[in-house]
């Protein structure tokens, strides 16, 4: 059997972390099994679906490296197929028109509530006579189409993650609506469960891998497969992603869409690596891998049943690992938009070498790309202000003389060797400790007492022609 899996997002919002993680597992499974990964856009909900969300979902999947082999297919372009399937179900008496008004349904639920019963449709229009139908039609009622669900049956499947799952027909809420009412006497808008089954059958989907919030839908869908004469695929329900309090990760946690993570300075390989670990463990215990490497080891039996806690520290750690090991050219390209947004006037073509050196200097201190903004601020600032620690330091004896000595030796176009020579010379001439010279210089050049390699920092500032002015400004303030 050839493996065919799909990701089937509804374009009612930007690409969500939960959908992206489901896409990761589908992609890994497809690649592990030399199968196909299909993108299907479930856009039948006309009011809530928007083309910009479709674009966001596509570009988000692409950014993460989750390329699809077929599609995107759009459900709105496949309505005829759903209507045919609904007609087949009606013809075979698996489905029927239900004329209940919303008032009648509300009243039914109120009664059930009063009797402490779970709300459900009581199948009252399952056996309407032609006369009753004619009367409802004459009243101008427009029917929905309901699919029959018998209470007495058990629906069971071997879930590839959760093992045996059993559902009682009586727990599925009664006969389910598969098509909305329509004003023009035709079958109205098909609903999710119906459209999914028709598509999964038509696209020969072999494995449905999706979030555990769809388990009840799976029970209903199995009944639809059987009624439509389709082969029931294998199902695998992935665990939910939980926040630090163990609740489902939601908007309240501040980030839900892949865009949010991108803006926060996470890079795609780190994020996709992290999502792979959200509920799956590699058999060899490895934690850092590319999608292709993970695909080689992926299997659904190593996906946990329990919810996967979102661990920000781990994501940060992974992101840092990727940033530290990224080729400098690539890291620079990733940092430039953040630097430009921060207003650092950057002429990339004119100063490429300088920017590459700056990138190399700061790479190891980055956890997120956004850290790169703060890290390099001193290289773009017109004027620096001393930190309180540096302020206190520069008032001590000797600092002024060190700065004076350095200023007189500084020139434009210094080499690394010359910089080291100046530091040595000033230390010797003033008979002070090298530490005093280094700290004085760091304070004068960067405004702080801690930071990246001092020699490299000075070198870069010198090449930009702003080192001397900074030292002079400190000297004046001490005079
Ligand atoms: N459109 C559904 C969703 O976004 C797809 C569920 C499925 O994979 O069947 O949740």
Image (cartoon, rainbow, N blue to C red):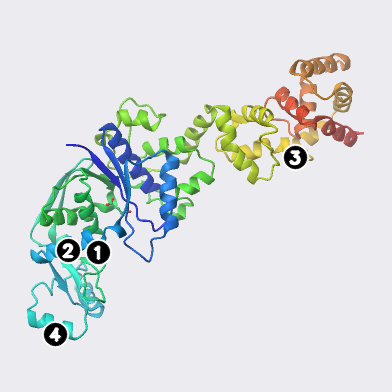
Regarding residue 202, the answer to whether it shows in the image is yes
Gap in angstroms between the C-alphas marked 4 and 2: 23 Å
Instruction: Work out whether residue 285 or residue 339 is closer to the camera in this orientation and state it.
Output: 339
User: Residue 425 in the image: x percent, y percent?
Assistant: 84, 15
Residue 432 vs residue 21: left or right? right
The image position of residue 436, as x and y in percent, is: 79, 22
Secondary structure beneath dot 4 equals helix
**Rendering coords of residue 350 (x, y %):** 70, 33
Mark 1 vs mark 3: in front: 1
Residue 186, by quadrant, is bottom left
Checking the image for residue 135, the label placed there is: 4
Q: Confirm or deny contact between disc 1 and disc 2 (CB under 8 A).
A: yes
Question: Can I make out residue 242 in this image?
Answer: no
Residue 105 falls in which quadrant of the image? bottom left
* Residue beneath disc 3: 381
Tell me where residue 348 sits by quadrant: top right
């Amino acid at each position: 059997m050839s493996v065919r899996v799909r990701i089937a997002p509804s374009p009612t919002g930007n690409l969500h972390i939960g959908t992206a993680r489901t896409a990761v597992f589908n992609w890994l499974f497809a690649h592990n099994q030399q199968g196909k990964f299909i993108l299907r856009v479930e856009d039948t909900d006309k009011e809530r679906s928007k083309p910009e969300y479709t674009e966001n979902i596509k570009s988000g999947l692409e950014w993460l490296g989750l390329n699809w082999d077929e599609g995107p297919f759009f459900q709105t372009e496949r309505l005829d197929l759903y209507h045919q399937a609904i007609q087949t179900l009606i013809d075979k008496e698996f489905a029927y028109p239900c004329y209940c008004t919303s008032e009648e349904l509300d009243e039914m639920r109120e009664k059930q509530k009063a009797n402490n019963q779970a709300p459900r449709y009581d199948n009252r229009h399952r056996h309407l006579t032609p006369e009753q139908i004619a009367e409802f039609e004459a009243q101008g009622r427009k029917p929905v189409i309901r699919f029959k669900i018998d209470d007495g049956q058990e629906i069971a499947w071997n879930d590839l993650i959760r093992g045996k799952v059993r559902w009682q027909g009586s727990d599925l809420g009664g006969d389910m609506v598969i098509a909305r009412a329509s004003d023009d006497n035709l079958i109205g808008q098909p609903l999710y469960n119906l459209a999914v089954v028709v598509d999964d059958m038509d696209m020969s989907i072999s494995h449905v891998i999706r979030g555990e919030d769809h388990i009840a839908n799976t029970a209903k869908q199995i009944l639809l497969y059987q009624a439509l004469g389709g082969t029931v695929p294998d199902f695998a329900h992935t665990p939910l992603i939980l926040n630090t309090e163990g609740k489902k990760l939601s908007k309240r946690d501040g980030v839900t869409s892949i865009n949010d993570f991108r803006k926060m300075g996470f890079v795609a390989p780190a994020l996709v690596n992290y999502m792979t670990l959200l509920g799956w463990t590699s058999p060899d215990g490895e934690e850092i891998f590319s999608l292709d490497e993970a695909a080689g080891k992926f299997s659904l039996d190593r996906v946990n049943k329990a919810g996967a806690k979102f661990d920000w520290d781990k994501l940060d750690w992974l992101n840092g690992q990727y940033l530290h090991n990224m080729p400098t050219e690539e890291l620079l390209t990733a940092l430039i938009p953040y630097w430009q947004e921060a207003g650092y006037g950057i002429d990339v073509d004119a100063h490429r070498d300088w920017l590459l050196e700056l990138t190399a200097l700061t790479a190891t201190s980055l956890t997120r790309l956004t850290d790169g903004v703060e890290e390099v601020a001193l290289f773009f600032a017109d004027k620096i202000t001393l930190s309180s620690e540096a302020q206190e330091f520069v008032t001590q004896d000797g600092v002024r003389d060190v700065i004076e000595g350095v200023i007189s030796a500084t020139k434009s176009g210094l080499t690394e060797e010359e910089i080291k020579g100046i530091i040595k010379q000033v230390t010797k001439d003033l008979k002070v400790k090298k530490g005093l010279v280094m700290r004085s210089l760091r304070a004068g050049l960067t405004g702080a007492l801690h930071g990246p390699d001092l020699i490299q920092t000075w070198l870069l500032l010198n090449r930009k022609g702003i080192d001397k002015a900074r030292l002079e400004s400190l000297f004046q303030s001490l005079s």
